Image: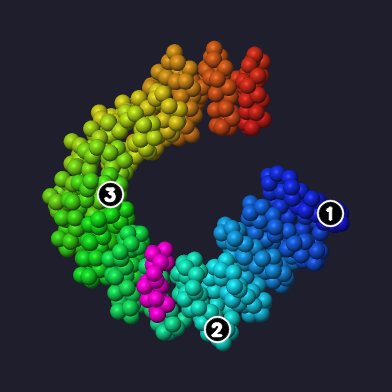
């Protein structure tokens, strides 16, 4: 069988080189089956060398090979033989296609976790040195991500050597290698001793921040955050903060965007909520000339505000909130709307009502539906500070407008926010203002809206209780059952299906299940097999056996699809 297995892999990979990629992909995905048939010894001695000679294949096939080899340790005989996988993975890590290299690197890191420290010192360290010193830049790119995996498990002398090699990669002539080093140094900082971080890695951090390529500089802020976590905020303030403040004024907007995007973890790592220079730089980013930068900064506004002294939050950010709420760019306003409600609990009810409420209301009237959706989605953030009643004058018109938006995706999103709003309202207020909307969505012309509206009923039941659902929702579901349009009759089935598990037996088996069963004689086949599908998903058998009787009757239906789904349901329900 083993000989047949090796022959099979030879045929499937070697002789199919000129066949469709899909067939070769299928062949490569069977590597573990082949290896299991060969056994660990022949896998190491025959299959792996064979794969090493198959690296001239399509990139998609090589990607699957790299993915397979990364979890191949059991197939080669466990951790003591894991090093045998390094050679083919090393070869894959040198190819031009970035996705293959990345998958191979991930595989080498996974294999390293299964290796002993002795094998790391010998085999893995040799592999890392080989990749880091090769002439072709793709090898050096692959090497960058391997240092963090090797460093904690090698000797003191080897650690010094690794730090030196990594420094060389940070100073490499090829920008892509420096970029890879910048991306990898964050993980490397986490495993290097703090004293060496201060003496060796901080200079690399500073040099990367001054790199001529903005693609390198935009990766520097996460390095600063990692350094601050390693050496402590007090030590980092003098080395990390000045570099990041300089990057916040970088000539390249992508670099400023990267600073704005990471500003909250930066301030947190430096414990700089009271640092005037850090906060002033953030305000500058919020007013940046590029909308992308303002958007990134606005998205971090409430998180940064939480790190500042609560009493100064409005003094610091009050004016900028007013400016951003009227920003000419809709993405900036949307980013602000998604976080601004989070300021209310920080400043307290009185100040929130006086200073922030006007901006909330302004955003609720925004021309862009995504801005209105964003502010509505954050209503829960101000729970107990600003009640829904305070926003009702603008909130309800905004919800009603979004509920009938011509874009069905907008309607779908607002449905998802209804449970959040419901938790802020008592049942009477909800009945008067939003109940009809929820019922109307059940009859929407778009299936996805009807489906979302049906699922929404379960959430509303959790908020207002079973008795509310029995009196307010079930009668509307029954009305849909009698609708002349078959799509709405299907919706009544779906609504009944989602409600049965959350209601009491009387409502479930006395009202909703009979509703579903009654539609088994509908004149439209789609409705009849909709009944079968619903009964299968419910997987219930009532005491009277009417569920099974209904499905048995459907087996005699004239429509093939109805019969198919009835058979399928009968196989899956109890009894």
The foreground one among 159 and 512 is 159
Q: Residue furthest left?
A: 354
Q: Look at 28% across and 49% down and name the residue there.
A: 332
Residue 510, labelled with which disc? none
Q: Are marks 3 and 1 in contact (CB under 8 Å)?
A: no
Where residue 439 sits, quadrant-wise, is top left
Disc on the earlier residue, 3 or 1:
1
Q: What range is drawn magenta here? A: 202-220
Residue 332, labelled with which disc? 3
The picture places residue 418, in percent across and down from the top left corner, at 33, 37
Q: In the displayed structure, would residue 173 be above or below residue 317? A: below
Q: Which element carries disc 3, helix, strand or loop? A: helix
Q: Which residue is mark 1?
A: 7
Q: Is residue 292 left or right of residue 154?
A: left
Q: Which residue is mark 2?
A: 161
Q: Which element carries disc 1, helix, strand or loop? A: helix
10 Å neighbourhood of mark 2: few (<14), some, or many (≥20)? some
Q: Look at 76% across and 48% down and name the residue there.
A: 16
| CA distance separating discs 3 and 1 | 60 Å
């Amino acid at each position: 069988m083993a000989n047949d297995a090796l022959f099979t892999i030879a045929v499937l990979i070697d002789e199919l080189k000129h066949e469709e990629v899909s067939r070769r992909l299928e062949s490569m995905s069977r590597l573990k089956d082949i290896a299991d048939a060969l056994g660990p010894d022949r896998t190491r001695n025959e299959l792996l060398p064979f794969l090493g000679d198959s690296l001239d294949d399509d990139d998609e096939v090589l990607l699957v090979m790299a993915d397979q080899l990364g979890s191949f340790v059991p197939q080669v005989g466990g951790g003591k033989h894991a090093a045998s996988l390094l050679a083919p993975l090393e070869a894959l890590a040198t190819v031009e296609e970035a996705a293959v290299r990345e998958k191979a690197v991930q595989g080498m890191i996974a294999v390293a976790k299964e290796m002993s420290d002795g094998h790391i010192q010998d085999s893995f360290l040799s592999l890392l040195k080989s990749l880091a010193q090769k002439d072709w830049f793709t090898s050096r790119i692959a090497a960058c991500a391997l240092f963090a995996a090797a460093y904690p498990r090698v000797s003191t002398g080897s650690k010094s050597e690794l730090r030196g090699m990594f420094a060389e990669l940070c100073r490499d002539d090829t920008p892509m290698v420096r970029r890879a080093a910048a991306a990898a140094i964050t993980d490397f900082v986490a495993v290097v001793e703090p004293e060496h971080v201060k003496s060796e890695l901080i200079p690399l951090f500073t040099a990367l921040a001054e790199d001529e390529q903005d693609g390198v500089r935009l990766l520097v802020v996460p390095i600063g955050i990692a350094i601050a976590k390693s050496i402590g905020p007090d030590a980092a303030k003098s080395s990390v903060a000045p570099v990041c403040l300089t990057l916040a004024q970088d000539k390249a907007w992508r670099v400023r965007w990267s600073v704005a995007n990471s500003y909250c973890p930066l301030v947190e790592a430096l414990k700089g909520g009271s640092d005037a220079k850090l906060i002033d730089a953030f305000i500058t980013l919020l007013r940046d000339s590029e909308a992308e930068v303002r958007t990134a900064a606005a998205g971090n506004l409430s998180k940064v505000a939480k790190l500042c002294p609560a009493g100064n939050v409005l003094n610091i950010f009050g004016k900028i909130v007013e400016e951003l709420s009227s920003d000419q760019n809709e993405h900036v306003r949307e980013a602000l709307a998604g976080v601004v409600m989070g300021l209310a609990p920080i400043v307290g009810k009185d100040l929130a009502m006086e200073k922030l409420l006007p901006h909330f209301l302004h955003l609720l009237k925004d021309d862009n539906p995504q801005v209105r959706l964003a502010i509505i989605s954050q209503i829960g953030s101000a729970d107990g500070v600003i009640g829904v009643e305070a926003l009702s004058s603008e909130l309800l018109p905004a919800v009603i407008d979004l509920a009938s938006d011509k874009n069905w995706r907008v309607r779908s999103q607002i449905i998802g926010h209804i449970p959040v709003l419901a938790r802020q309202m008592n049942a009477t207020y909800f009945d008067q203002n939003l109940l009809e909307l929820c019922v109307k969505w059940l009859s929407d012309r778009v299936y996805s809206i009807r489906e979302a509206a049906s699922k929404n009923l379960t959430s509303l039941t959790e908020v207002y209780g079973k008795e509310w659902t029995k009196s307010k929702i079930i009668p509307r579901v029954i009305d849909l059952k009698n609708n002349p349009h078959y799509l709405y009759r299907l919706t009544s089935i779906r609504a009944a299906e989602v409600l049965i598990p959350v209601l009491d037996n009387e409502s479930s088996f006395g009202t909703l299940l009979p509703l579903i069963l009654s539609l088994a004689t509908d004149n439209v086949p789609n409705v009849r097999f909709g009944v079968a599908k619903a009964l299968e998903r419910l997987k219930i058998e009532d005491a009277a056996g009417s569920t099974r009787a209904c499905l048995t009757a459907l087996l005699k239906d004239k429509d093939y699809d109805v019969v198919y789904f009835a058979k399928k349901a009968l196989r899956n329900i109890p009894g």
